[in-house]
Amino acid sequence: MLFYLRRGREVWQCLLLWLLLLAAWEAGSGQLHYSIPEEAKHGTFVGRIAQDLGLELAELVPRLFRVASRERGDLLEVNLQNGILFVNARIDREELCGRSAECSIHLEVIVDRPLQVFHVEVEVKDINDNPPVFPMEVKNLFISESRQLGSRFSLEGASDADIGPNSLVTYRLDSSDYFTLDFKRTEEEIKTLGLVLKRLLNREDAPEHHLLITATDGGKPELTGTTQVKVTVLDVNDNAPAFEKTVYKARLYENASQGTLVVMVNASDLDEGVNKDIIYSFNTETSADILSKFELDPISGYIRVKGNIDFEEIKSYEIQVEATDKGIPPMTDHCTVLVEVVDTNDNAPQLTITSLSLPVLEDAPPGTVIALISVSDRDSGANGQVSCSLAPPEPFKLVSTFRNYYSLVLDSGLDREATAAYVVVVSARDGGSPPLRASASVSVEVADVNDNAPAFSQAEYTVFVRENNAPGCHLVTVSARDADARENARVSYALVERRVGARALSSYVSVHAQSGRVSALQPLDREELELLRFEVSARDAGAPALGSTATLQVFVVDENDNAPALLAPGAGAAGGARGELVPRAAGAGHVVAKVRAVDADSGYNAWLSYELLAAAGGPFRVGLYTGEVSTTRALDEADAPRQRLLVLVKDHGEPALTATATVLLSLVESGQAPAAASRAAAGAAGGAAALLDVNVYLIVAICAVCSLLVLTLLLYTALRCSAAAAAAAAALAAPGEGACGPAQPVLVSSSAAGSWSSSQQRRQRVCSGEGPPKADLMVFSPSLPPCPVNQDREEQLGVDTDLSSRVSRFSLFLYNAIVSYFSGSSLLWKHVWLKINATLHAL
């Protein structure tokens, strides 16, 4: 009971001391502190880190909120939606910190715009997740039957990877008549476990004993581990070796040379002879790491250095040594050797640089954080205390943000044009003797800002291009340069859109965005557009973009692509011929006509000259550049009364284009010229009035014919109806009559043709008597003879046929009269009259 009270008091003292240290740590650091148990599930809540740091949730993503950790940065993560720090992966305290009493995860919380760095410490609390584990599942123990009551046999205790109360192990031995379990704890926290003999052994009664030892830790819930002890009872050698000390302590500097003496163990045996000779050896459960670093002399008991001793790897060693005599059976004793490794300054400082704001904009304000620097030294004490310096000091400085954490901060303004990049060397020095140093360099590139607009090589470009150019032809290539760098100096070109007449500028020309090549999209026509003036803009790719413009003047150079065009001839001329009356009394040099022509081209291409074709020896000539036709001599009676002149009009282009004009001259007496001119004028003036009268008469005639047609149809229908009624009455009055009389047309269906057949024939007389033949309209069948009808019906049919014939003849007469009268009318009206006539004949 006293043992448990003492152990509980020690546990509470340790917990209180740990809490005091934790409070002092938080007060000194001034940073956030959280705690979580190990083995927490994924997504376990740790803390509202954004709220605790005074950050708004809406700022987390825009300000690039992120968490960094030097060790196992994937264990914890922050939800950027709610600002909660949660467990991202399995956290095993024993794997992370081993058996260290303190175990924390240090996080760096970084936000930009502006840059802020926070330090968060998350303490990982131990839980009872590791059961006690014995070195061996079955322990073989050989005990002589001659051993006295109360003899103690040392055993290897169980180890628990947890710490604190979770690692406090108690042991329980299942019921045994021969042994009790003895567990002791020394002041150095060395726990010894052994079996105590409470009843004399008798090999003949029980040559073997199987014991079960259960180890239980102090966690909640408790975890247990077991081992079986197989005790083999031996006879003879009844005194085991005994070490002078149960625990040997030694201090050893790290990096000690091979063969350095660590400690000497010594054991004695009360037996005599061979049973007194002792052999020293490491315990069979000794780890391979200890065996690789230490060696034991089996005769002298000297323990020496065999391998490399590194304080940063292991700070202390616990070695189990056995002393075994040479008796039969052999007997052994155990002792523990504690080797404390003393640190030396054998590790230089380590620098870790995290670049945050590289490259740095040349307009960045002083105080901008460029990089985070963390310094560490694996040594301890003064050997692990590090100080930092910066070279060159301008224009940067180091600012300490936390224990062994620094920020590289901009101390003054930058100018990319003066210095485009800096190489900053950070040096670290520890406090050892002699001190060790380390350095790291940071390449700070100064990033350009878009403070220069593109500049064209010339403000105005003048281009001459011939008209009728090929589509897509190259006009000019504009070029602009930007003094900035990278994207800020990447220039793209574009047209400044505007309207050119009724069309957009982009339908005429285009500019390649990358090369600045200006091309014509379609053939240009100087007669339509002599000068095309527009602007091209150059913009860089900066943000915001800067730009400038240049003016382009495209002059369209004329080509001889238009032939001379003659002006319209005067009234009464046909086919471009110009008719003129010339008095025979005209003397030499008298102007009788003038040929007028124009050319749409310009310059020499539009300069026209006139010449008279086939005029050798004639009485007329034409002015070379005036186009005036004049007499070369006085006219006489020998000259033909009608003169036909052919004038060639030619421009001065290459090649020259021409046109011809025909001038018809009528030689008249002097008194006839004015009268003829008056008649020509009167005829021209009356042409329009005559055309108007023709149209009026034609409309009246068409209306009259249409009215006559409708009247004829109505009359014809009435006559047919009255004839049918008269025929029916005659048939009722004289049914037997029919020997003489005209045959009545009968409508039948032709079996041979399969369609209706009709024929207009002369009516034949079938009885005695002669009469004038009459035309009749008959529909007949070739298989049936015609039937006779009465005389009234015959006369009625004759009247119908005669009336139809007369209407048709009248229509043709009216058509011929109108066409002959208006012979100059359009052919369309003739076509209309033909259609009307065809309709009347069909009826």
Image (tube, rainbow, N blue to C red):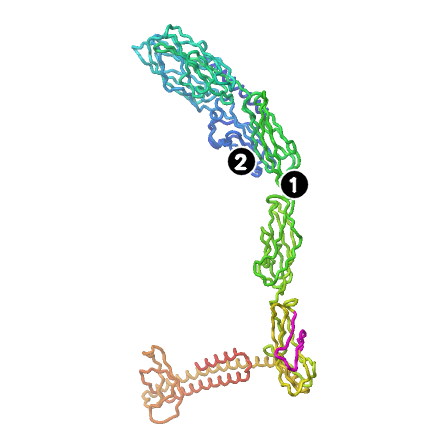
Q: Is residue 641 visible?
A: yes
Indicate the position of residue 62 as horizontal and vertical percent values.
57, 39
Residue 608 among those drawn in magenta: yes
x 56%, y 60%: residue: 471
| Span of residues in magenta | 607-628
- Residue type at numbered disc 1: Glu
Give the numbered dot on residue 417.
1
What is the secondary structure assignment of the residue under circle 2? Answer: loop
Q: Residues within 10 Å of mark 2 (few under 14, many from 20)?
A: some
Q: Can the viewer see residue 725 in this picture?
A: no
Q: Position of residue 583 (x, y in %)?
A: 67, 85
> Of label 2 and label 1, which has the lower sequence position?
2
Left or right for 215, reference 704: left
698 vs 476: above or below:
below
Which one is nearer the viewer's eye here, 800 or 305?
305
Residue placed furthest toward the bottom: 769
Foreground pick, 564 / 239: 564
Q: Residue 220 location, x and y as percent?
A: 45, 22
Q: Separation of disc 2 and disc 1 at Cα?
A: 44 Å
* Element on which disc 1 rests: loop
Q: Position of residue 205 (x, y in %)?
A: 30, 10
For label 2, the residue is: 82
Is residue 386 depicted above or below 583 in this figure? above
* Amino acid beneath label 2: Asn
User: Which residue corresponds to the image point at 66% horizontal and 36% vertical from the top-left?
Assistant: 413
Observer-side mark, 2 or 1, equals: 1
Label 2 with label 1: CB-CB less than 8 Å: no
Q: Nearer the viewer, residue 143 or 193?
A: 143
